[in-house]
Amino acid sequence: MKKQMEIYRKTFAVLCCAIAISACTNEKNLFIAENINFATGQTKHMLQTTGDPTGKNYPRTMNGNNRLATTGKYDWTPGFFPGSLWYLYELTGDTLWRHEAEKWTHSLEQLKTFTEHHDLGFMMYCSYGNALRLAPKPEYTTILIQCAESLSSRYNEKTKTIKSWNYRKAWNDTTEWFYPVIVDNMMNLEMLLAASKLSGNTKYRNIAIQHANTTLKNHIREDYSTYHVVNFDTITGEALNKATCQGFSDNSTWSRGQAWMIYGYTMMYRETNDPVYLDTAVRLADFYLKHLPGDLIPLWDFNVGQPGYVPEKNSYATQFQEKLRDASAAAIVCSALFELQAYAPDRSYRDYAVKMLRSLASPDYRAPLGENANFILMHSVGSIAHKTEIDKPLVYADYYFLEALSRYKNTK
């Protein structure tokens, strides 16, 4: 009798577990379907506003009149809208989105020889990289290899980095940056690694690894917070100064900068299997997670308004102390954590990713249909230091939200 009861107990436990798993799966599928439905509806409105690509009408943000603000192809953001269209194609299988994605992607082909700043990875891998992945054509391979060659022209053997920006001055209008490298640059390395595999040319892979190693050495503090900008001496290769350009202060941690680094080193581990990169991604992510508010959407800078973090020549930033969140940083990290959870021993990263995604999809951050200039997410911050895109939607926030949604759909 006891043996029979034990069998019943175990059978009941298995049935309860199966029911719970089924309920969770159904709830997940409903969540994903609802967000896909919203994103497709919102993006159809966006396409009605933009019309066909002209080289000057890539969605970027919302202006002061709550209307769509677009940008030209030579900005750093034009690849995100085509990339979002590719994710909608992946999420729906609807050829409408493939057609639109191809049209907007092809409009960027001229950029394959562009060398004026480091953002070619954002511009061309978010567009052509996704095109190659989802609807491959031989010309996409050729274009991406040419893009890698163009980006590699900004690599300096002495500094072992890719130069981010051309000459500019720091906030104080005195410090000159002749060779600035920013944390965002980690996101452009994926295109180099892909081009190396596509072409068989190890040069691109070696440049990506050298850049990642130099960034690891110079941009990361002991507690695994990060500097936004490091200015290098091209004669000695040494770091001359470490600062910010979009954060609260030179010694603070700009939340989107931390996000780029988490994503970048997670990707570097995927492509190289170097455990140093995985350890770095984990430590960067742990710092980020420890400094989040309850809804898991970060302040635009983790140290804004705190003692010891004083903005240089940027009193404008003090108006925003602890008020503004940055949904774009959250979307980037959310997507990164869905990947990191597959590599890291701590499986809680998946739980954080799901909670972040659901927070972003809540009415607090996801726009009502037909509003927000037809962007998906509200409440991002471009650059308070430059008084631009403050508490606005941003095209790259939508891109990484859709990428995170796709990764969630493909995660068990």
Image: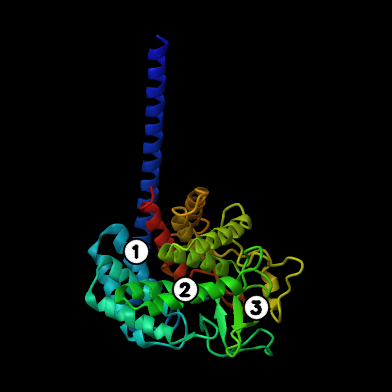
Q: Is residue 392 left or right of residue 45?
A: right
Camera-side mark, 1 or 2: 2
| Labelled disc at residue 243 | 3
Which residue is the extreme one toward the top? 1
Residue 21 visible somewhere in the drawing: yes
**Residue matched to label 2:** 209
Q: Label 2 is placed on what type of residue?
A: Ile
**Residue at x 61% of width, y 79% of height:** 230
Q: Position of residue 191 (x, y in %)?
A: 39, 74
Task: Name which residue type carries label 3.
Answer: Ala
| Rendering quarter of residue 200 | bottom left
Q: Position of residue 88 (x, y in %)?
A: 33, 63
Q: Secondary structure at mark 3?
A: strand
Q: Quadrant of the N terminus?
A: top left
The residue wearing badge 1 is 87
Residue 161 vertical placement versus 93 (above, below):
below
Q: Residue at x 41, y 17 (%)?
A: 6
Q: Nearer the viewer, residue 410 or 393?
A: 410
Among numbered discs 3 and 2, the one appearing first in the sequence? 2
The amino acid pointed to by label 1 is Tyr
Instruction: Name the element at disc 2.
Output: helix
Q: Quadrant of residue 130?
A: bottom left
Against 406, residue 12 (above or below) is above
Determine whether, in the image, residue 100 is placed left or right of residue 35: left
Mark 3–mark 2 distance (CA, rounded to whole Å): 23 Å
- The residue mark sitting in front, 3 or 1, is 3
Viewed as shown, does residue 386 lie left or right of 395? right
Q: Earlier in the sequence, mark 1 or mark 2?
A: 1
Label 1 neighbour load within 10 Å: few <14, some 14-19, many 20+ = many
